[in-house]
Image (spheres, rainbow, N blue to C red):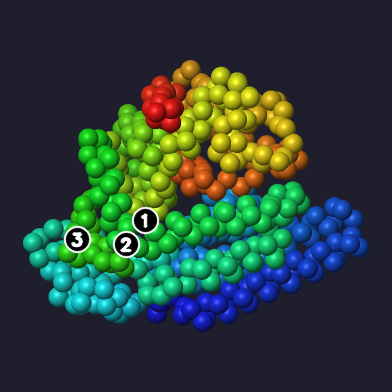
Amino acid sequence: MNEGPVTKGRRFFKLAGMTAQVAGSYAKTRIKGLFQSEEDAERERNAAHELNGGRIARTLGELKGAVMKVGQMASIASDLLPKELAEALRSLQRQAPPVDFAVIARQIESELGAAPEVLFKRFEVEPFAAASIGQVHRATTDDGREVVVKVQYPGVDGAVDSDLAQLKFALKAGGFVKRATGLVDVKQQSLDEVFAEIRARLVEELDYCNEADNVRRFGEIHRGDAHIIVPEVVGERSSQRVLTLTFEPGDRIDELDARGYSQEVRDRIGDNLFRALAAQLFEHRILHADPNPGNLAFRPNGEIVLYDFGCVKQVRPEIAAAYAKTIRCGIAEDWDGVDEALRALGVRNPEGPPVEPAFYKQWRDVLALPFLTGEPFDYARATLHEDVIRLIPAAIKRMASFQPPREIIFIDRAIAGHFGNLRRVRSRSRVLDMVQPYLDVALANASE
């Protein structure tokens, strides 16, 4: 246990110190590279980025709060971050160390007006889970309901802007943004828009009243889906920084083997998870945008329990339609349609050079593979994540044609995250058959 998040003043100095180290290392490497062969300079740059990636990851892990949350979102910034930093940040995906219970008890009393032992019939001191901005405790209400109580760490909501400003400066000062884009500068406006989108989701995530509304909204969305379970809000024990929900049990994703889940059940889970994601994105246009496997649990009848509704992305009808059009046109090899849809999504730089159809086909053949096979797609054998890495060197040469897409970074995060979840579940699905009706809905809604 630790005493709690670092205070705002100490946070600033720790982040500023980290930035100075990263910037100094980058400057030293650049100067040294002027006197080296291209091969030696590249090796030095790789080593420096690995060292600085470790520095950033360690600092974010110590500070928790917004910067650690951004570190855990490394996958959504894959277009901006090089592999050395992305790999270092993966360490932040592991459960954060919990804070001392006295900190949690004080926060509950400050928010709800009484100590945990007064508000609840039973309140477990040991946390059920700990994360970047808060931790969860099991409890029982006076009327006997089993619940989980999510408590936000004190002070993290007041440090979002300074945290993000320091992190953005560190990434730029360390050459990470430039490095990730093949030495092509990302426009300041594009980088600012990406961080503005991240900030917007973080501010929402730090407001537990907003999350309570999200829980109720998703409960309504999935009310007719017997295979999707959403907890209920216990409003009288919730506030802006404390959220109490009914406890919905289930098996974690790494417990499926030990629990003896059959292939048939795994396939059913995969279908249910895919349909839930498609319905949220294309039909309801509100997306559970935190695909961390810890936010899912499963039951032997194929049911899926959804947890943590802090990070939710509202999707405009035209964005859902453009995403649907990208998929449809990609499958049909309509490259002009793909280019037009990517412009609507903000992926294509309107001032950038044209993109040849062969480039789009190369990416389509990898990313759309689940839609192209006539057989059920076997996620356990999927290599999309590895195949994409092999395409990156060629993509770097065309970076001027593209830009960081603010509107879809959280959509891409959800889709990429659930691809990883389906691989771990080891499900098999006829993906094209399932997605077609949802594409129809998205395109029809946009034309109304």
* Residue at the image position 81 percent from the left and 64 percent from the top: 30
Q: Is residue 24 left or right of residue 419?
A: right
Please tell me which residue lies in front, 400 or 92. Answer: 400
Q: Residue 33's spot in the image, x, y percent?
A: 85, 61
Q: Do the residues labelled 2 and 1 touch (CB within 8 Å)?
A: yes
Alpha carbon distance from label 2 to label 3: 11 Å
Q: Residue 259's spot in the image, x, y percent?
A: 30, 43
For badge 3, the amino acid type reads Gly
Res. 94 in view: no
Which quadrant, please, contains the N terminus? bottom left
Q: Which of marks 3 and 1 is nearer the N terminus?
A: 3
* Residue at the image position 36 percent from the left and 34 percent from the top: 283
* Residue at the image position 40 percent from the left and 53 percent from the top: 311
* Residue position marked by numbered label 2 in the rendering: 208
Q: Which of marks 2 and 1 is nearer the N terminus?
A: 2
Please tell me which residue lies in front, 97 or 215. Answer: 215
Relative to 422, does residue 90 appear above or below in the rendering?
below
Q: Residue 380's spot in the image, x, y percent?
A: 47, 34
**Residue 31 location, quadrant:** bottom right
**Residue 265 location, quadrant:** top left
* Residue position marked by numbered label 3 in the rendering: 235
Alpha carbon distance from label 3 to label 1: 16 Å
Relative to 7, does residue 278 appear above or below in the rendering?
above
For badge 1, the amino acid type reads Gly
Q: Do the residues labelled 3 and 1 touch (CB within 8 Å)?
A: no
Q: How crowded is mark 1: few (under 14 residues within 10 Å), some or many (20 or more)?
A: many
* Residue position marked by numbered label 1 in the rendering: 310
